[in-house]
């Protein structure tokens, strides 16, 4: 069975589960009832081909996933207003992404401002000077019904800011604890079955997914990321957002046009990124029961690791090619035909995947081989998908923001975590 077939049958099964009114985190047994026996997920996409979530949450599910009763008092008006939006949201399928974000905005913005005694965990932002670049590559695999990185086209990106680090567990924890935000649903994790992964009840804060507060947060969906961004914007008076896909690639290339920003040899990746390397191979083989060819270098990280452990690219950005892949603002388009030329997010005329809304994620992860770790490679994920297969996000903002400086609390905590990780590696 090809990856695309797997995704289709997994989707059918999950749809069936929903129709049967079972919870999405119910026992996830053999797929034989809806999926034919077949080959395991192959390595064409290096194990990173993520099944879609069964579509955007219903508004009822969204409301159920929002702050608890204890925290709901200050949000009562927002909830009432959100319920009033029920009908328009159901009727406006094409603009569901925008509507979900609008709803999240109403709920998260109703949370109180951070108390003065709580140091906000805010990373420093790299200012990315605008310019033109050639986006795309003809070297990546082409698969039907999956995003390709062609045609190569010129994009003129405006200046913007991008976090030097991927969003961490600690940052997300601060958001959850102070806003009362509730994450519903499940998280897809690596597993020793035919397909190499399964649905788990372990969420973003489970020990396996969050080894420390300075690891990148995983098991967060595009919706969850936007809820965080809305909250962080309110706390700071700045406007944080996800980067567009074009901004992401422009920043990852950092002015270069080689396969990787440092050159063409994949064995050089371990200096710059946590990828599927000598350290990752045995750990991932244990989890998946599969033997894959690793990149012939050692980054000393089996799964995810503390952010910022590797050399930054020429523009001061860490982990763009590894650790976790990163969500962008763009919905799925299967090619770059008709893509914006100004670096803006591409959010209209989205290509669905078996009827489902998808978004684009970029950058390699701890589970990526030479192709996935390329700055030009594209992957997709369901709008509401959550996984620990190596997906997180990184915050961006317009340059009109007042400051690129991070908070002392974040920088101090990260420096301590990095020192501890260096000590572990030195042993
Ligand atoms: Ca690794």
Image: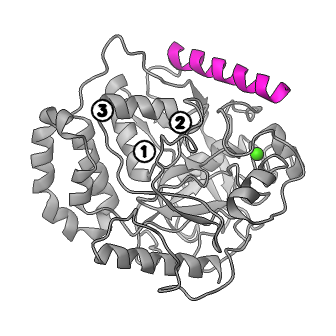
Q: Position of residue 236 (x, y in %)?
A: 37, 23
- Mark found first going from the N terminus, 3 or 2: 2
Q: Which residue lies under the disc numbered 2?
A: 167
The answer to whether the residues at label 2 and label 1 have Cβ atoms under 8 Å apart is yes
Lateral position of residue 243 relative to residue 76, left or right: right
Compared to 394, does 63 lie above or below?
Answer: below
Q: Could you tell whether 118 is left or right of 275 in the image?
A: left
Q: Residue at x 39, y 66 (%)?
A: 26
The residue where tag 3 is placed is: 179
Question: Magenta stretch containing residue 423, yes or no?
Answer: yes
Residue 52: image location, x then y, percent: 48, 68
Residue 66, relative to residue 305: is it above or below?
below
The answer, for residue 342, to whether it is visible in the render is no
Some atom of ligand 1 lies within 8 Å of the CB belonging to the residue at label 2: no
The magenta stretch is 408-427
Task: For ligand 1, tell me if the residue under mark 1 lies within 8 Å.
Answer: no
Where, quadrant-wise, is the C terminus in this rendering?
top right
Q: CA distance from mark 3 to mark 2?
A: 17 Å
Q: Which residue occupies the foreground of this view, 134 or 75?
A: 75
Q: Secondary structure at mark 1?
A: helix
Q: What's the CA distance linking mark 1 and mark 3? A: 14 Å
Q: Where's residue 12, x and y in %?
A: 43, 80
Residue 418 part of the magenta segment: yes
- The prevailing secondary structure element of the residues shown in magenta is helix
Residue drawn at (48%, 20%) of the image? 403
Residue 225: numbered disc: 1
Tag 2: Cα neighbours inside 10 Å, few (<14), some, or many (≥20)?
Answer: many
Q: In the image, what residue occupies the spot 65% across and 32% down? A: 306
């Amino acid at each position: 069975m090809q990856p695309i077939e797997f995704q289709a049958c997994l989707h059918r099964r999950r749809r069936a589960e929903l129709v049967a009114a079972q919870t999405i985190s119910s026992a996830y047994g053999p797929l034989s009832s809806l999926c034919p026996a077949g080959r395991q997920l192959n390595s064409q996409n290096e194990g990173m081909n993520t099944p879609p979530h069964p579509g955007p949450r219903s508004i009822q599910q969204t409301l159920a996933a929002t702050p608890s009763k204890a925290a709901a008092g200050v949000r009562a008006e927002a909830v009432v207003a959100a319920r009033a939006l029920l009908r328009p949201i159901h009727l406006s399928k094409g603009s569901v992404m925008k509507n979900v974000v609008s709803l999240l905005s109403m709920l998260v913005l109703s949370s109180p401002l951070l108390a003065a005694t709580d140091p906000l965990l805010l990373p420093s932002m790299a200012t990315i000077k605008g310019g033109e670049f050639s986006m795309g590559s003809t070297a990546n695999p082409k698969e039907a019904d999956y995003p390709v990185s062609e045609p190569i086209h010129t994009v003129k990106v405006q200046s913007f800011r991008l976090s030097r680090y991927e969003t961490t567990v600690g940052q997300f924890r601060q958001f959850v604890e102070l806003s009362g935000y509730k994450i519903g649903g499940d998280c897809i994790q690596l597993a020793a079955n035919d397909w190499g992964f399964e649905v788990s009840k372990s969420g973003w804060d489970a020990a396996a997914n969050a080894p420390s507060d300075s690891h990148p947060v995983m098991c967060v969906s595009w919706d969850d990321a936007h809820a965080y961004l809305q909250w962080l914007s309110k706390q700071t008076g700045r406007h944080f957002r996800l980067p567009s896909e074009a901004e992401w690639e422009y920043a990852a290339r950092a002015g270069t046009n080689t396969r990787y920003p440092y050159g063409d040899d994949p064995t050089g990746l371990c200096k710059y990124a946590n990828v599927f390397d000598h350290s990752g191979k045995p750990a991932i083989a244990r989890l998946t029961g599969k033997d894959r060819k690793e990149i012939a270098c050692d980054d000393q990280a089996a799964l995810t690791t503390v952010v910022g452990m590797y050399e930054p690219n020429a523009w001061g950005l860490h982990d763009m090619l590894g650790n976790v892949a990163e969500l962008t603002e763009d919905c799925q388009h299967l090619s770059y035909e008709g893509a914006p030329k100004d670096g803006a997010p591409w959010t209209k005329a989205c290509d669905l995947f078996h009827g489902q809304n998808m978004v684009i994620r970029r950058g390699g992860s701890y589970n990526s081989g030479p192709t996935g770790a390329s700055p030009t490679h594209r992957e997709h994920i369901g709008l509401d998908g959550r996984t620990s297969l190596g997906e997180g996000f990184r915050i961006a903002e317009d340059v009109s923001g007042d400051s690129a400086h991070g908070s002392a609390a974040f920088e101090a905590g990260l420096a301590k975590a990095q020192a501890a990780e260096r000590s572990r590696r030195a042993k």
